[in-house]
Image (spheres, helix red, strand yellow):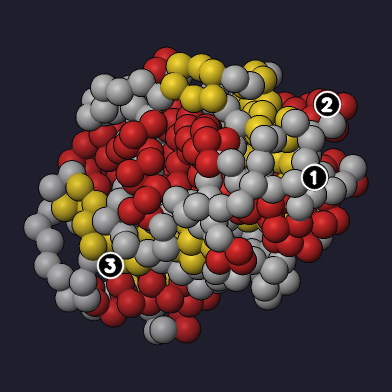
Amino acid sequence: MTRLIVAYNHRHVRRIAVFTRKLRPLTAAVVLGVAAVSACSAPGQAEQPAEGFPSEIRIGVPLDTSGPVGPVVEIGLSEREGIRVAAEEINESGLLGDSKIVLTESDTAANRDEAVKAVTQYVDKGVHGIVGFTLTPSFAAAAPVAQRTKIPVVAVGLSGGGVEETGDLAFRTYPNVATTVYPPADVTFAKDFGAKTAGLIYASDNDSSVAINKARKEALEKAGVKVVENVAIGSQDTELRAALTKLKGASPDLVVASTTPGQVPAFASQAAEVGLDSRMITVDGTQTPATLKAAGTELQCAVFQAVWSDISTKGNNEHFLKEFDKRSEREPDTFAAASYDGLWVLARAMKDADSTQSGKVRDALLKIKDHQGALGTYDYTQGTGAPTLSGEPMIIDGGKAKAYESGQSCTA
């Protein structure tokens, strides 16, 4: 567990060769700061200092920054970077007056027990909030501990259900893609491609993946697309050839992958190895630099619905890109954006509540309706702990993620 307080240089977080664009170090006074005027505050605006806070506002940051699946580690590192950038910016802005956000980082290593251990330690340390969680199983195991001990949690990397259902102190930045994001997009893609049949692959030991796969299957079948195969794998499997060979045997027009984002490179490369040449619909996160590099050319023409992209002009994304470029050596991605927003909405709620008391912070979060974040405009006023965010269709072409337009052609 790492406690970040004053200043640090984290050039060492850069782990793979794909992150070569930036050479500037991120040196941060880890304490939060961003600005916002009145109820419509957002990063980058001027603001009056807040009152009534402790000198240090302690935030627990449980993320998977090591573990058995390399791409998952890269996701965790991106999430950590997004939180660090937000903390640095918020602290400099004076959003919380003279109070500074102090991050207590924990590597949960894609392990439920480690996640529970981290949150238990946060309870002992008296943190004022938790921003993090890379994988759903870790959240499901550990978040109830925070709920019982009255610590507000903002989950940043979880794409399935089960977050806000944990309790009234559980919130999320990343939307539940099984509802308004993937299913309608899958139907549109299927119609564009003239697909009559589909094969599905999902992680059966991951509740999020199971729910997403179920929703996608139902949407496709309702649209008249016959699901000819539905193959289960493990969420940490990297050997997928047997499952992909089974899919190939069903000869689907489409293969819809509800794997974890970290499995996308193995899915794409091994699909090519076994000769599975069906059109691919993958998951958000496919566009990350680490995934594109690891998959090489095998993701060519893959499509997906993205909650975030670096070409989006929604919300405060242009400001996020500018700040991330200024403060970090890593390439920005979906996970950095979602985690950046996570710390921001929590800080915004504390500012609005003029308190770190959990009930007041919860009530302030539920009143947020126009916070401009990297993923778009946040609205929590429906009372569920989930924002009303959608996404936009993307396609991988020439090793890059680009905006997809209906009827667009692509040469594999």
Q: Are marks 3 and 2 in contact (CB under 8 Å)?
A: no
Q: Amino acid at mark 3?
A: Asp
The Cα–Cα distance between marks 3 and 1, rounded to whole angstroms, is 60 Å
Question: In x, y percent, where is residue 82?
Answer: 48, 38
Outermost residue, front direction? 48
Q: Are marks 2 and 1 in contact (CB under 8 Å)?
A: no
Between 203 and 385, the one lying in front of the other is: 385
Front: mark 3 or 2: 2
Could you say which quadrant of the image residue 371 lies in? bottom right
**Residue 307 shown left or right of residue 371 in the figure:** left
The residue that disc 2 covers is 125
**Residue at (76% x, 52% y) in the render:** 354
Marking on residue 353:
none
**Residue at (56% x, 53% y) in the render:** 47
The residue that disc 1 covers is 52
Could you say which quadrant of the image residue 66 lies in? top right
The Cα–Cα distance between marks 2 and 1, rounded to whole angstroms, is 20 Å
Question: In x, y percent, where is residue 263?
Answer: 43, 40
**Residue at (57% x, 27% y) in the render:** 30
**Residue at (16% x, 53% y) in the render:** 397
Could you say which quadrant of the image residue 168 lies in? bottom right
At mark 3, the secondary structure is: loop
Query: N-terminal of the two: label 3 or label 1?
Result: 1
395 over 215 or under it: above or below: above
The answer to whether any part of residue 295 appears in the image is no
Q: Quadrant of the N terminus?
A: top right
At mark 2, the secondary structure is: helix
Q: Amino acid at mark 1?
A: Gly
Q: Are marks 3 and 1 in contact (CB under 8 Å)?
A: no
Between 288 and 91, the one lying in front of the other is: 91
